[in-house]
Amino acid sequence: SIGSMSTVVGVVDSGIDPTHPDLYLNIWINQGEIPSTFLDDDGTKLVDIDGDGLITFYDLNHATRATTAPYALNVAGFANGPNAEFVRDLNNNSRIDADDLLRDALWTSGTDDDGNGFFDDIFGVNFRAGAGDPFASNNPTDELGHGTHVAGTIGAIGSNGVGVVGVNWQTSLMSLRILDNNNQGDSGAAIRAINYARDM
């Protein structure tokens, strides 16, 4: 098996770089935080391109993977896909990633849409964000690099001609940041991260 987007792996570390070219497709999207106005069954809203029952960055970037070996990956690009009207490349890296969704007021309502106690937790939670912290709880972006490295071991995109390949070519990587920018953490943050992953 090359993995599955329905398998979610919580990376409890320094976060994950959601823009990383070898990870961005495999970053988890909290389905409960997708704006309800983007979802319906009549084919006029977000399209689940691969039919796996999830909206993922594969769908948002119009990426498909062959179902047989060698499992070739084709990324047609978000501008060419059926979901183009719902996404914007706000960080100008020519793809749609979790950083774009966090920057987009169409995706971030500032409310707790899924009722889990966290607002706009699109790809995970920063459990080390404090009052006035520029990295709010809904932004578990990696500033240290270690969590991104770990995420790559677990699930770097396979057959994309970039970097390395993870144990799983396809998986949903949930970013659970428990380390601050000084590489400091505490057991309370780790426990909250594990509880979040379990609850989700």
Image (cartoon, grey):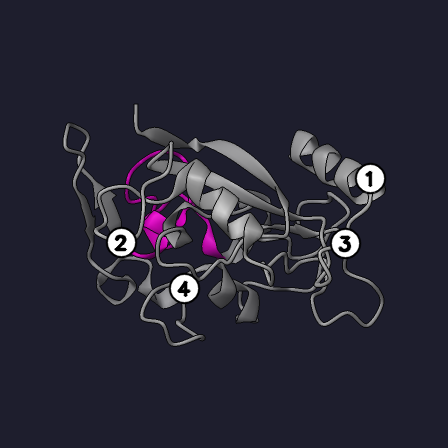
Q: Which mark lies nearer to you, 4 or 1?
A: 1
Asked if residue 137 is positioned above or below residue 193 in the image, the reply reads below
* Residue 136, percent from left and from top: 72, 64
- Circle 3 or circle 1, nearest the eye: 3
In 3D space, how far apart are the residues under numbered discs 2 and 1 (Cα atoms)?
35 Å
Query: Which residues fall within the magenta stretch?
Result: 38-62
Q: Is mark 3 on a helix, strand or loop?
A: loop
Question: Residue 134: horizontal and vertical position, in percent?
Answer: 72, 72
Q: Mark 4 points at which residue?
A: 86
Amino acid at the residue labelled 1: Ser
Q: Earlier in the sequence, mark 4 or mark 3?
A: 4
Q: Main secondary structure of the magenta part?
A: loop
Q: How many neighbours does mark 3 have within 10 angstroms: few (below 14), some (14-19), or many (20 or more)?
A: few
Front-lying residue, 160 or 28 = 160
Closer to the camera in the image, 74 or 176: 176
- Who comes first in sequence, dot 2 or dot 4? 4
Residue at 81% over, 72% down? 132
Q: Quadrant of the N terminus?
A: top left
Q: What residue type is labelled 4?
A: Phe
Q: Which of marks 2 and 1 is nearer the N terminus?
A: 2
In the displayed structure, does residue 150 sit left or right of residue 62? right
What amino acid is at disc 3?
Answer: Gln
Residue 94: x percent and y percent?
Answer: 31, 70
- Please indicate whether residue 142 sits to the left or right of residue 18 in the image: right
Element type where label 2 sits in the image: loop
From this view, report whether residue 60 is shown above or below residue 117.
below
Three-letter code, disc 2: Val
View extreme (top): residue = 1
Q: Mark 1 points at which residue?
A: 187
| Residue that numbered label 2 is attached to | 162
Residue 28 in view of the camera: no
- State yes or no: residue 43 in magenta: yes
